[in-house]
Image: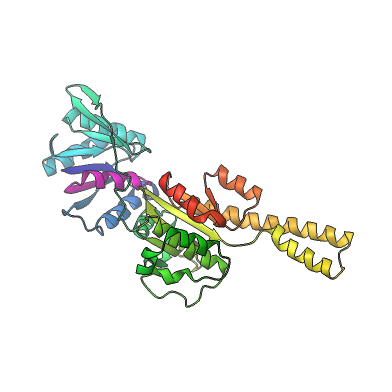
Amino acid sequence: MTLLTLSSRQIWPQVLCTLHIRPSRLILFHSDEGEESRHPAERLKTFFNTIPWEQPMEVELRRIPHDNFSGIIEVFHSVAETLLLDGGNGCVNLTGGNKLMAMAAVEWCRQTETPCFYLERNRRLLSFRSQGPDFIPQPDAQVIDLHLARNLDPLGLLVCQLSDAEVVHPGLRLTLRENGRNLHPNDLRKLIANDSPIDFRRYLDWDHQAPSVPENAGDRLEFATALALLKLGVPVVQRGVHLRPRIPRPTGRNEGELDLVFNWKGKLWIVDCKDRRSAENRMGKLRTELLSLNAMTSRVEATLEALEEELRAKDLHPLKEDLLSISEVGGILGKVVCVRRTMEPQAIEYATSRRIEIILKDQLFENLKRLLDHP
C-alpha cells in the first residue's frame, strides 16, 4: 500500500494516520511554502526514517503547487503513473495541506477511484470511495487507537513539531528504575506530600549524567512530577529541553526551557513546573517577623500591602509568558499542564482561558491520573 498525504504545519494527523495505515511507501506532498509545508515535510521524513518499523517503509518528498488546482491533479497523476498506482494499492490522506490542495486531491481520487480519508480531532477516521461520478462517504468511521503512538520518542516528536524554534539541548530522558516500578502509589503520594527535600531521582534512570544535587525546590517538583507520570503509565518523560529561535544567525541565547515533555494518547504534552510560594505566603512571614519585633505600624502595613501586590504582578507576568510560549509548542493536538505549589486567582483565570490544565502540588498524583485517564 502506498499512502499519499498532504503535508502541513501540524504533524500529528500525519503521524497517527501513517501508524494506522502502515504503508510500504509514504509520499509526502509539499508546496514551496517553507514554514507551512516544505519544512514540516522534511522534518516528518527525518522522523519517520528514525522509527524502527516492523516492515520497511520508503518515504519520499514530492513538490506540489499550493495554488493551481489542475497542476495539483497533474502531479498526483504523474506520481500514480510512475508508481503504478490504482484504486487497489494506494490511498490518500486529506487531513493536511490547504483547502485547494485537499479539493484537488479529492477530485483526483474521484477520477481514479482511489480511496481517501480525513482524520478528525477526536481521532475518527472518515473514509470515502468513488463510484462512477459519485464520491461516497463510507458508513462506519474508524476510531484510531489512543495508544497507537505510545512508543514514539517524545523528543523526536517535539523536534518534528517545532517550526519557530529548535532544540539545542535534549535534557534528560527519564524512565523508572526497578525500585521506582516497585514503589506503591500510596507511598509516592506520601513522598510528594512531604515538604522535606526528598531526592526523587533515586527512583529514576536517565540517559546521561544529571546534576549531582537538585538546585532548588522547582527541580524536585519536576522529578516528582516525572516520577508520578511514569508510575501512571507514561513510557518516557524528557526533562529540561532547551530551545532557541530557528533563525539563520542565532545570537546563542536560548529561547527557553521545557520542564517536562512526554507523548501520551496521540498528543504531545508539555508540563511547566514551579514550586514557588505565593506572594501572600512570603509577605505573611515578613509580617510575622515584624510583629515579633513590635515594628508593625500603619505605614509599614501599607508598604507591605503595596509590595505584596507588586510581587503578585511580577509572578503573573513571567507565568503568562511561559504558558503562552509552551502552549504554542505542542501543536493543535498538544496538551499543556501547569504544576504549582499554589497559584493566584488571576493566573488560574489566565491559564483556564488558554485551556491550560492547572495541577496543585498537594493533589499532584490524583490530578495527573485524572488528566491521563481523560485528557
Identity of the residue drawn at 74% across and 65% down: 285
The answer to if 214 sits in the magenta stretch is no
Query: Percent from the top left, x then y, of residue 275?
Result: 58, 62
Identity of the residue drawn at 84% across and 71% down: 293
Which one is nearer the viewer's eye here, 69 or 307? Answer: 307
Which one is nearer the viewer's eye here, 235 or 75? Answer: 235
Q: In this view, does 196 lie to the left or right of 80?
A: right
Query: Percent from the top left, x then y, of residue 208?
Result: 37, 73
Query: Percent from the top left, x then y, of residue 52?
Result: 22, 58
The answer to if 23 sits in the magenta stretch is yes
What is the total number of numbered labels drawn onto the structure image? 0
Q: In this view, does 132 lie above or below 147?
A: above
The residue stretch that appears in magenta = 7-27
Which one is nearer the viewer's eye here, 14 or 201? Answer: 201
Identity of the residue drawn at 47% across and 75% down: 211
Q: Residue furthest bottom?
A: 212
**Picture quadrant of residue 133:** top left
| Residue 323 shows in this picture | yes
Task: Classify the position of the N terminus by image quarter.
Answer: top left
| Residue 256 shows in this picture | no
